[in-house]
Structure formats: structure tokens, C-alpha cells
Image (cartoon, rainbow, N blue to C red):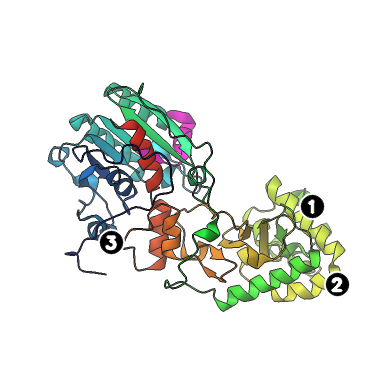
Amino acid sequence: MDHLSQPSDFHSTSHGGNSGQQNRPTTIRFADIFAGLGGFHAGLSKRGMQCVFSSELDKELRDLYYKNFGLLPEGDIRLVDEKNIPKHDVLCAGFPCQPFSVAGKKKGAACPSSGKLINDILRIAAFHLPKYILLENVPNILTIQNGEFWEYIEKSLSELGYEIDYKIFSPHQFGIPQKRDRVFVVASRVGLAHFRWPTTTGRVAKKLSELITHDNENVRHIEPAKMRILNKWQQLVNEVKKMNSYSIVASEFGASYPITNFKKTSLHEMRMLKGAFGKPLTNCKTWADIMSRMPHYMQDRNGGIPDWLRSSLIYSRALYSQHQEFLDEWKLDVVEANNSWQKLEWRGIAGNTDIWQHTIQFRASGIRIIKPEFAPSLVAMTPTQTPIIGAKKRYMGVREAASLQSLDSLRCFPENNGRAFKALGNAVNAFIVGEIANNLIC
């Protein structure tokens, strides 16, 4: 990592849109709470505003924030006395979203740690009473705990004299090839009669291929084991020829155990059937023996599966009946693969069965094949979830992913690829917040 005495200037990449107030004087000052990579800073500083305070818990991200913006954030906001925060006109916060996301525990305000961090935003707002507040989070904050968490935020801000509004936006609505819904909240002590949400009408999203230009970047190449499994799936796709929205579940090839009424089937009846990949259950003496030969998704749920998965299992068995000779040989190389590699989720181009002309993502739910025009939603990904650019046969680079958050002009990112993608997954889209602020702040 470069020495901290050399911060860089930031010049954000524009994706078009309203820029009528970009020459606004720097007298408008903002505080950037839970700053991360600095999405709020990038979006607002481009509009001529000045950051006077920032906070970020992660030390590496604090160091990067200094290098990119020339301002070293404070650490844990819970330990910062609001009286020591400089006066500001705008309070920005993309507070941690895990407790409220679909992937999180959905504890909302009941969460003992980050779910309570909204109170730190509120105590700072109560002391400084900034003219505007701008928040970003996952849409689930509106509905978590039957809407009680959002009601708490709305009521608390209203009691401080703010008028509040919110809207859900995705980058693709602003010409950026990523579908990633986030809720943006604006609050104003001078009312919102002057405010209009940015228009998304007529904005055409770039294709992802237009952003995949950093071949000289230190990109990751696909691991040999993943190359082998993708080529195996390509063989199957070539055989099947026509793909649809059902997932293909390889462990169903040859299986005959009951998909419905599993728990009502007797041990004697089960012993006449077949388990994962067609393993005979004849010699099973106990239900424990039976379950050991079931696919992992049946073991995890003790035989109870959701409707969406049931449809894919039925479809996979139908494919097996149509291509049994081919699949009996094909599945031999897949039996020992990771469980998630044994399922193919097709979200690709209709009529195009070439996996390598798509975007590919290894997910916990399976290998997902995605239309190449859009990137999958950047979330706090693990390194294994980093999108693969099929045409390049490599992973998406960090700076390419940063362009999906309008942060590609940052000079510095985490050196570790996994941490870089996690930070980008947690980041606020700089262009969207800039567009919103441009209409809000006067």
C-alpha cells in the first residue's frame, strides 16, 4: 500500500445526466458516516461540495479514503462525540445493511450491533441539525419487522423537523450495466417542495462489454477445476440444445426417490428406489443410511423442499429420461464436484447456448449463467462469487467492478481481491447519490 502522505485528487467518471449545478461553491459542507470506499464523497465532491468529516470502522478503508480523498476518517462512530464533529450542511450515511438484507439475519433494529447504528446517525443529526440528510440502504429496511424499523427512522427524523421521502433506484436506470436495487432516503429541514427525484426516462444502459477494457489489469484467471466443470456443463448444454429458466440439478440424474411426500414414504418403499445420481438404496438398513445417499438439499431440509426447487428437480429428471445414455456417462465427472457446482442456473440469452458468451457466477445456489449485457448485483461478495467474463475467460477486474459503482477513477483499492470486491459490494453508487444531491441541495 502506498504511503499515506500521498493522497490523490479524485475525478469521477460521468455516466451522463443532470450536471447543471456542478459548479456549486464549496461552501456546502457534508459529513460522510460509514464512509467505506467513499461513494458519497465521490458523488458530492464532484458537485462542488466539501467533506469536513468522515468515519469508517475498517482501518484499511480509512487509509484508502485518505489516499483517495486527502481526509483521514475517524474510526468507530459510536466512540465519536457528536460535539467534536464539524458543523455541516449535509449528513450522508450508507449505514451497514447486513441485518436488513435478504442475505442477512433480518433482525433490523433488534440487532445488537450494526442494526443499532441508525441511532448514531440520529444523535449526530439531533445535535447539528444539518439542512439535509441523505441515506442509502437495501430496500428491505422499508419492510423489516413489519415496517417498524422504517417507521422508527421516519418518526425520529420527523421529530427533528425533517420532511422525508424515499425512492428505490438501480444503476441500470442511470445507464450503468448493473441491476442492484437500493433505497435512497432524503430528508430536509426546509421541506421538499423544491426537490424532484432524478429522471431515469430515456437513459440507455451501456453494455457490460463496454466497461470490460482493463485487460492489462492484474486480473484473476479461472482456476483449472472451474474451467473443467464449466466445460463439462457446456457439453451438457450442447446435448440439450434448448435452455429455459429451470435450473438443471445433476444429482437428480438417475434419482427416483419421491420428491413429494418424502416423509410419508416407508423405509421399505425407499429401499426400492434410488438416491442422488441414481445410487441404489437397496442395502440401506436405517433412515440414516437413506439420508446419507440423498442429495444435500434433501438432507439439509429433511425431505422438505420449496416449490421453486421442486420444479427444477422435476425438470432435471425429465432431461435425464430424454438423454439417459449421454447423462449416465456425463455425470461420472460431476459426482465428486462441489455441491454448488452440480447445479446450473440458466439466466442467459434465449437461443444462445454458448456459456462463454455470457457472464458466469459461481454462487452458493449453483453456477449461474447470466446475459452478458448486465453484471450481477454487486453485493459484499466472497472471492468465489466474483463475476466471470465468459468472452475473456477470466474474472472481472476490480476497476471494472468499480465502474459499476461509478468509483473507477479512485486511485486506490484494497490490494486483496476479495476485500476489494467486498468493499465495492458495500459501496454507495457515486453517480446516483450525486444526481440526487444535485436536485436536493440548494
Q: Taking 326 as reference, is 89 above or below it?
A: above
Going 48% across and 65% down the picture, which residue do you hit? 213
Figure disc tally: 3
Quarter of the rendering containing residue 162: top left
Provide residue 246's location: percent of width, then percent of height.
72, 53
Left or right placement of residue 132 versus residue 364 in this view: left
Is there CB contact under 8 Å for labels 3 and 2?
A: no
Under tag 2, what secondary structure?
helix
* Residue 297 in sight: yes
Q: Which residue is mark 1?
A: 265
Q: Earlier in the sequence, mark 3 or mark 1?
A: 3
Left or right placement of residue 179 versus residue 190 in this view: right
Q: Is residue 138 magenta?
A: yes
**Frontmost residue, 268 versus 276:** 276
Under tag 1, what secondary structure?
loop
Q: Which residue is mark 3?
A: 60
Amino acid type of the residue that numbered disc 2 sits on in the rendered structure: Glu
Determine crowd level at label 3: few under 14, some 14-19, many 20+ residues with C-alpha closer than 10 A. some
Q: Which residue is mark 2?
A: 325
Left or right placement of residue 38 versus residue 394 in this view: left
Task: Estimate the spatial distance between the alpha carbons at disc 3 and disc 2, rounded to whole Å.
Answer: 54 Å
